[in-house]
Amino acid sequence: MSFGIIGAGAFGTALAVSLSGKYPEVILWGRDKAHMRNLQMHRENSRYLPGTVLPAALKPTADINQAAAQQTLLLAIPMQTLRQLVEDHAGLFKGKTLVACCKGIEQSSNLGPLAIVQDIVPDCQSALLTGPSFAHDIACGLPTALTIACADDMVGRQLQQQLTTSNLRLYRTTDTIGAELGGAIKNVIAIACGAAMGAGLGDSARAALMTRGYAEMQRMALPLGARPETLAGLSGFGDLTLTCSTQASRNYRFGVALGQGVGFDPKITVEGAATARATLSRARDMQIEMPITAAVVGLLEGAIDISQAMEMLLSRPLKEE
């Protein structure tokens, strides 16, 4: 058995490294030919995952046909570029098992990754790999637990067995809505938490934002059919806890910069920024209140500053928890 990993960033490379310890061949594809030649020659992804030696079983390539020849493909690419990639290679992806490894909501459509994949390649088997994880931890062999979400439980069971490795333990669910929205909204809350810490508002403020952010996650996801236990699990509460509490999180670091009023490297993908806008748009359509998400969007658009955002949240009407 072999797998194709589409996307040679940090997370795609880390997954390929982990799977290479279990399978004789794992194909890692990236569109940048020079970058992939560098991986082949030096056996290290110095751009995105420096210090990690690529195992012999890991085969880097810039040939999409080589990767797409595998039956199971892991799509480890940013959420906002998912549609374009799948559209570009839809013919190669027909009939495959496609596992989305991105978290977020597409800003142009308010859709999650599974809906996008199914819309473009309706005859594929689709699943989502999500949960609390950092690429460096996975690549270094540190213990990590993730969720594989698939509407077809039989396919989910197969993927659970296939993708579990010596350091990567997978739990499965058929609740794709809960898994998608948990992974998406936690990035928005991570920006809010980072902004609070960057502005010097303290750990108590961060704890409050995490807790009330979790309430916002439930407020949107449950009416759409998500199960409470999914949101309380790895793909919801677990991922929220990790992403809101460490500088290793890109969304949290971006929030810290926002709170400090300093610039942030535009080359770093911050999924929560586009997702915040899409989430707020969807919340308005659903006529539900998501004040933390609204505050994040206000900060992103420069409509409010951090002190105004905190005042807006703290002056809301008092109510039962």
Image (spheres, rainbow, N blue to C red):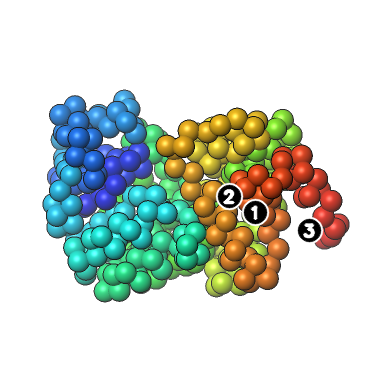
Disc 2 element: helix
Q: Position of residue 282 (x, y in %)?
A: 58, 66
Q: Name the residue rendered at 52%, 52% in the picture.
A: 274
The residue to which callout 2 is attached is 188
Q: What's the amino acid at mark 2?
A: Val
In three-dimensional space, the C-alpha distance between marks 2 and 3, rounded to whole angstroms, equals 21 Å
Mark with earlier residue (1, 2) = 2
Disc 3 element: loop
Quadrant occupied by the C terminus: bottom right
The residue to which callout 1 is attached is 293
Mark with earlier residue (2, 3) = 2
| Along the viewing direction, whichever of 111 and 57 lies nearer the viewer | 111
Q: Is residue 67 visible?
A: no
Mark with earlier residue (3, 1) = 1
Q: What's the amino acid at mark 1?
A: Thr
In three-dimensional space, the C-alpha distance between marks 3 and 1, rounded to whole angstroms, equals 18 Å
* Disc 1 and disc 2 in contact, CB within 8 angstroms: yes
The residue to which callout 3 is attached is 321
Nearest-to-viewer mark from 2 and 3: 2
Q: Name the residue rendered at 60%, 39% in the picture.
A: 255
Q: Position of residue 249 (x, y in %)?
A: 51, 38
Q: Name the residue rendered at 14%, 55% in the picture.
A: 65
Q: Position of residue 88 (x, y in %)?
A: 25, 60
Q: Name the residue rendered at 46%, 50% in the picture.
A: 131
Dot 2 alpha-carbon crowd within 10 angstroms: few under 14, some 14 to 19, many 20 or more? many
Dot 1 alpha-carbon crowd within 10 angstroms: few under 14, some 14 to 19, many 20 or more? many
